[in-house]
């Protein structure tokens, strides 16, 4: 399969017929694989290089330094998760050994003044900043760039769904997205049975913006029962649809099962995943007017999903 690509800047500047054709192509991709390579994103190379390097420095620290920013209690959504703490396949009810990875997680930079108590107790808990020079500034700059980019992608999505381009704007005024830096240590031996770098799962939210290790292999999507490699392109992101968007579109669009495969002798791999999530109170009702799914609020929906993956 040739992996679908979409150029956001070309879409945004296209006129009438060309724009319509691109929107149709985007709709097809989201119905078919729900994964695409995003070009023309306009994120400044410095913003990417700075967070990439800050994450490398963070993960290169010893375990004690990393655990200094571990979640203070179980269920705290942010901080450092060491090896043996997460198995993503459990979100699909599959019992597997823990994923061969470690991660650092952070939440929204701005807290709205009227956030409710449940939101304050979950997604608006503070990000725990590691003692790595320049980390916080690099992280916040990248997070802000991802928030802007996700809003632009949501506009393209609206057009692809034959809606006004600002349709989603009121739902993503104060998004509760999370940013996750991932490090997959080099694999020496054969992993345990069913053990992966990231077990097969779907993402939870509206869309994910992934920056994979340049030239690195391992991310795979399931297509017709087979695992297909996702290619990496220098300077491009990988975008995928999450469960909430599939639900929003009444399953017109697919939230595709994916994993990061583990094999013996792999070099270390790093990636950054931005999980875009509409405002806590955004009510997600099927866009086609059907009753395919009852309404859910974005925040409680996310909280419910979050609980299943700890080991
Ligand atoms: O690291 C990657 O390439 C993908 C990770 C992923 O799918 C996730 O964390 O949800
Ligand atoms: Fe994922």
Image (tube, rainbow, N blue to C red):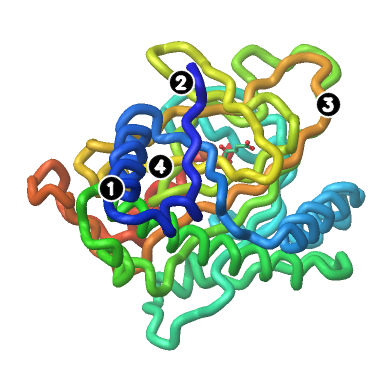
Which element type, helix, strand or loop, lies under badge 1?
helix
Which element type, helix, strand or loop, lies under badge 2?
strand
The part of the image, by quadrant, that contains residue 141 is: bottom right
Query: Where residue 52 sits in the image (x, y, percent)?
Result: 77, 52
Q: Are marks 3 and 4 in contact (CB under 8 Å)?
A: no
Q: Earlier in the sequence, mark 1 or mark 4?
A: 1
Relative to 74, residue 290 above or below = above
Identity of the residue drawn at 88% across and 54% down: 57
Relative to 234, residue 146 above or below = below
Is the C-beta of the residue carrying label 4 under 8 Å from the nearest atom of ligand 2? no
Instruction: Check residue 198 in the rendering and tell me which mark sits there, or answer none.
Output: none
Q: Earlier in the sequence, mark 3 or mark 4?
A: 4
Which element type, helix, strand or loop, lies under badge 4?
strand
Evaluate whether residue 158 shows in this view.
yes
Q: Nearer the viewer, mark 3 or mark 1?
A: 1
Is the C-beta of the residue carrying label 1 under 8 Å from the nearest atom of ligand 2? no
Evaluate whether residue 72 shows in this view.
no
Query: Where does the C terminus fall, quadrant-wise?
Result: top right
Q: Are marks 1 and 2 in contact (CB under 8 Å)?
A: no
Residue to which mark 1 is pinned: 17
Instruction: Check residue 267 in the rendering and tell me which mark sits there, or answer none.
Output: 3
Query: Where residue 226 sits in the image (x, y, percent)?
Result: 47, 12
Residue to which mark 2 is pinned: 222
Question: CA separation, marks 1 and 2?
Answer: 33 Å
Is the C-beta of the residue carrying label 3 under 8 Å from the nearest atom of ligand 1? no
Q: Earlier in the sequence, mark 2 or mark 3?
A: 2
Query: Where residue 123 sits in the image (x, y, percent)?
Result: 49, 66
Q: Residues within 10 Å of mark 4 (few under 14, many from 20)?
A: many
């Amino acid at each position: 399969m040739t992996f679908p690509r979409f150029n956001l800047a070309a879409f945004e500047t296209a006129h009438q017929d060309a724009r319509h054709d691109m929107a149709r192509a985007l709709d097809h991709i989201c119905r078919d694989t729900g994964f695409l390579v995003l070009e023309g994103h306009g994120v400044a190379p410095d913003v990417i290089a700075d967070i990439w390097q800050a994450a490398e420095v963070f993960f290169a620290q010893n375990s004690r330094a990393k655990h200094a920013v571990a979640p203070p209690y179980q269920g705290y959504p942010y901080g450092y998760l060491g090896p043996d703490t997460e198995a993503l396949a459990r979100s699909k009810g599959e019992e597997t050994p823990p994923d061969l990875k470690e991660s650092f997680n952070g939440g929204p930079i701005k807290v709205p003044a009227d956030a409710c108590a449940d939101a304050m107790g979950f997604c608006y808990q503070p990000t725990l900043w590691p003692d790595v020079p320049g980390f916080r500034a690099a992280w916040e700059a990248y997070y802000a760039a991802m928030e802007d980019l996700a809003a632009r992608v949501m506009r393209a999505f609206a057009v692809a769904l034959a809606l006004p381009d600002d349709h989603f704007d009121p739902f993503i005024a104060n998004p509760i997205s999370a940013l996750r830096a991932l490090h997959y240590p080099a694999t020496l031996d054969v992993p345990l049975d069913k053990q992966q770098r990231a077990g097969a799962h779907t993402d939870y939210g509206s869309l994910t913006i992934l920056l994979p290790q340049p030239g690195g292999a391992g991310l795979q999507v399931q297509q017709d029962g087979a695992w297909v490699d996702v290619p990496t392109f220098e300077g491009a992101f990988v975008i995928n649809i999450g469960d909430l968007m599939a639900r929003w579109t009444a399953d017109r669009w697919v939230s595709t099962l994916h994993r990061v495969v583990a094999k013996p002798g792999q070099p270390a791999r790093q990636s950054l995943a931005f999980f875009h999530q509409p405002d806590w109170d955004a009510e997600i009702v099927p866009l086609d007017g059907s009753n395919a799914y009852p309404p859910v609020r974005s925040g409680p929906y996310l909280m419910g999903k979050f609980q299943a993956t700890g080991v």
